[in-house]
Image (tube, rainbow, N blue to C red):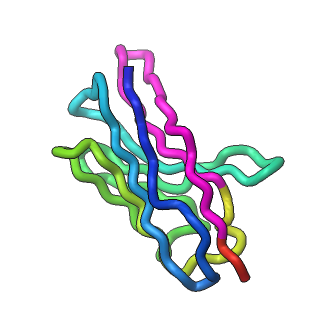
């Protein structure tokens, strides 16, 4: 099993910054992908950014140039630096970890979520 614990959410004014952290523990494979997703009330959960254990990153168009994802493999921790925040970034942010269980199966683990609120 894998446990993910997020921290760093909160209330910030538009144009401000926040840094989210997510620490993974348990049965973690050396090769995996960690990422952040977000969900607003009444909407589907959407990708924010992902990063592989090798350091390759992927971002949603809506956050490119404003958010930066990084990770510390030694600490099994992923970070999301969020700058130039907008009210539309207000969501619950979820950490995720994907591990390949077999040649055909990938398992995704989720954190409990952390609220980010951006006031205008």
Residue at 57% in and 45% down: 113
- In depth, the one of 36 and 2 nearer the eye is 2
Number of numbered discs present?
0
Magenta region, main secondary structure: strand
In the image, residue 83 lies at what x, y percent? 49, 77
Percent of width and height locating residue 52: 32, 45
In this view, the residue in front, 33 or 18, is 18
Quadrant position of residue 40: bottom right
Quarter of the picture holding the C terminus: bottom right
Seen in the image, is 41 located left or right of residue 101? right
Residue name at image x 29 percent, y 22 percent: 27
Report the residue at 79% width, 51% height from top. Answer: 41
Residue 89 percent location from the top left of the image: 65, 67
Query: Would residue 108 be counted in the magenta stretch?
Result: yes
Identify the residue at horizontal 44%, vertical 17% (top origin): 105
- Seen in the image, is 64 located left or right of residue 30? right
Q: Quadrant of the N terminus?
A: top left
The stretch in magenta equals 92-117
- In this picture, is 6 found above or below 79? above
Q: Residue 114 or 66: which is nearer the viewer? A: 114
Q: Is residue 72 left or right of residue 6?
A: left
* Residue 69 against residue 36 in the figure, above or below: below
């Amino acid at each position: 099993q894998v446990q993910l614990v997020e921290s760093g959410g909160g209330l910030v004014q538009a144009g401000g910054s926040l840094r989210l952290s997510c620490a993974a523990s348990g049965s973690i494979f050396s090769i995996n992908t960690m990422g952040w997703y977000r969900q607003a009330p009444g909407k589907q959960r959407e990708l924010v950014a992902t990063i592989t254990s090798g350091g390759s990153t992927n971002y949603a168009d809506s956050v490119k140039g404003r958010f930066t994802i990084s990770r510390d493999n030694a600490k099994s921790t992923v970070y999301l630096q969020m700058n130039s925040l907008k009210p539309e970034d207000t969501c619950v942010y979820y950490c995720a970890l994907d591990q390949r269980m077999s040649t055909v199966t990938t398992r995704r683990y989720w954190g409990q979520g952390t609220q980010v609120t951006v006031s205008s």
